[in-house]
Amino acid sequence: MPTILKIQGGKPLKGTIEISGAKNSALPLMVACLLTDKPFILSNVPNLADIRTITQVLETLGVIAHEDGNTRTLNASNIISTTAPYELVKTMRASVLVLGPLLARFGHAKVSLPGGCALGARAIDVHLEGLRAMGVTCDLEEGYVIAKAPKDGLKGAHFTMRVVSVGATENLMLAASIAKGETVLQNAAREPEIIDLANCLNAMGADVQGAGTDTITIQGVDSLNGTQYKVMPDRLETGSYAMASLITGGDLTLTNTSLKYLPMVRETLEKAGAVFEELDNGFRVAQKGPIIGVDVMTEPYPGFATDLQAPFMALMSVCEGASMITETIFENRFMHVPELARMGANIQVHGASAMIRGVKNLSGAPVMATDIRAGIGMVVAALAAKGETTISRLYHLDRGYETLEAKLQACGAVVERHKAEI
Ligand code: EPU
C-alpha cells in the first residue's frame, strides 16, 4: 500500500538525531562478502530498502544472510549463481558492484545493464573499461553483460578513469583485491565511502593503499578472510538534517557522525550563516541570523556532494538574496525544481545551473519525491513551509533515510505517514 508523508511546517527542530550507518558505504561493503568463503559481519547497517535489495541480489547468488538489528552476517561459502538479474539491478544500480568480486573469485559473471534512471543515462562503461584492462572479456547479450576473466584469473592493471566514478572505483578495488599482481587506479574517486571499503578490505587481508587520494594501489592477494566491520556514518543523512535544522531556525545535535566527512558542505553552510559546534561524537548546528544566499557547484569529493544539492536548494529557496547552484555530476538532477516551485520557490533553470531567488516563505503543497535526495529536499522545504505539505512516492525516501519521521518527530517536527488515498 503506497504511503504519503504529511508535514505541518514552521516548527524549529530542536533535539538530538542519531545518524545511521551510510547506505552508500554499506552497499559495497556487503558486496565485499563475495570475496571470501568465511563469515563476514557488518555492524551499523541501516535498515533501508536499498539494503534489502542488495541482500536479495546476494541471496540470489547463494549468499546466506542473517539480520540482527543493524548487524548483518553474510556467508558466501556456497555461491550457486553468478547472475545479477534485471528485476533487481533495475531497481538499484549499485547491484552492478557484484561484477568485480564475482569475476575475481569465480572467473565469470552475468550482470544486467541497469538502464537509465531518474538522474540520467548513468552508464557503467568505466566499470567495464577497467575490468577489460584486467583481462576481462565483456559481451552484451539480451541486456546482460556476460563477463569472463582470463583462464588464470584477473590480472592487475594500471588504469586511469576517464570520469571520476564512485561505483567504478569500488568495483575495481573489489576485483583487484584478489587479482594477480598490482593494480593502480588513477583519477579514482576520493569519497569517504571509498576509504571505508579500503579499510574493510584491508581488515580482510587485502593490501589497498592510497584510498582517499586519486591514486589507489592494490597488491592482489591469493584469498581474503572474513571480518567484522562497522559501517561509517551516513554523511548525506547528516548533511540533510543539518540543513533541516537551519531552514527551521532550529538547534540540532547530530550524533554518531562527524563534520570531517562534510568539509565543503560545512564551509558552504557557514557562509549561509550556520554555526557549528563540534562535539565528541558529532556536532551541533544552528542558524545565526538570516539564511544568506551562497553559490554552489556540485563536484566529486571533497567538493559539494550532488546528493545534498536538493536539500541545499530547498534551504536557498528562502535565503536573503540569491543563489546559483550548478550540477556537474548528473545531467538530470533538477527534478525537484518544479516541486519546490509548487511550494512557492522562485527558481529558474538554465542548462546545468539553477538561479534561486530567495522568497520570504514557502507554503505547503502536495509534492512528489522524484528520487531519494529530491525527496529529502521536499522534506527540508516542508519543515519550514507555512501549512501542510503532502509528499508522495515515499518509496524513494525509504531507500535512503532510516526511520525518517521518528527522527524528525523526536525533535518537534509535525510529520506523519499515512496510507495514500488512491
Ligand atoms: N559515469 C559514467 N560511466 C560510468 C560510471 C559513471 O559515465 O561507468 C558517470 C555517471 O553517469 C555520473 C558520474 O559518472 O554522471 C558519476 O557517477 P558515479 O559512478 O560516481 O556514481 P555512482 O557510483 O553510480 C554513487 C552514489 C550516488 C551518488 C554518486 C555521486 C552509491 C550507491 N551511489 O553513484 O548516490 O550520487 O555516487 O557521488 O554509492 C544516492 O545515494 O542518492 C545516490 C544517487
Image (cartoon, rainbow, N blue to C red):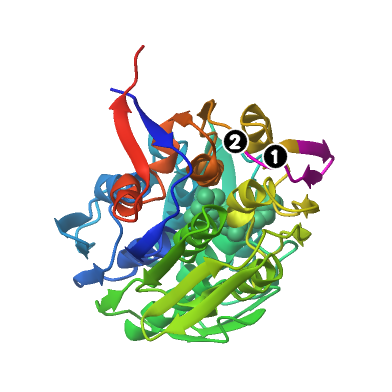
Residue at 62 percent across and 46 percent down: it is 314
Query: Number of labelled discs?
Result: 2
Q: Earlier in the sequence, mark 1 or mark 2?
A: 2
**Given the image, on which type of amino acid does mark 1 rest?**
Asn
Q: Does mark 1's beta carbon lie closer than 8 Å to ligand 1?
A: no
**Given the image, on which type of amino acid does mark 2 rest?**
Ala
Residue bearing mark 1: 332
In the rendered structure, the answer to whether residue 198 lies left or right of residue 267 reads left
In the rendered structure, the answer to whether residue 358 lies left or right of residue 315 reads right
Residue at 37 percent across and 66 percent down: it is 29
The foreground one among 196 and 378 is 378
Task: Identify the residue at the far right of this view.
Answer: 350
Q: Residue 11 at x, y = what percent? A: 43, 47
The foreground one among 118 and 105 is 118
Q: What span is colored magenta in the figure?
A: 347-361
In the rendered view of the protein, which quadrant contains the C terminus?
top left
Residue at 48 percent across and 68 percent down: it is 175
User: Residue 369 lies in magenta, yes or no?
Assistant: no
The answer to whether residue 136 of the structure is visible from this angle is no
Marking on residue 118: 2
Question: Dot 1, crowdedness within 10 Å: few (<14), some or many (≥20)?
Answer: some
User: Residue 356 lies in magenta, yes or no?
Assistant: yes
Where's ligand 1: which quadrant?
Answer: bottom right
Are the residues tagged 1 and 2 within 8 Å (C-beta)? yes
Residue at 37 percent across and 47 percent down: it is 413
Task: Identify the residue at the far top of this view.
Answer: 422
In the rendered structure, the answer to whether residue 7 lies left or right of residue 285 reads left
The foreground one among 264 and 248 is 248
Query: Secondary structure beneath disc 1?
Result: loop
**Residue 387 vertical placement versus 353 (above, below):** above
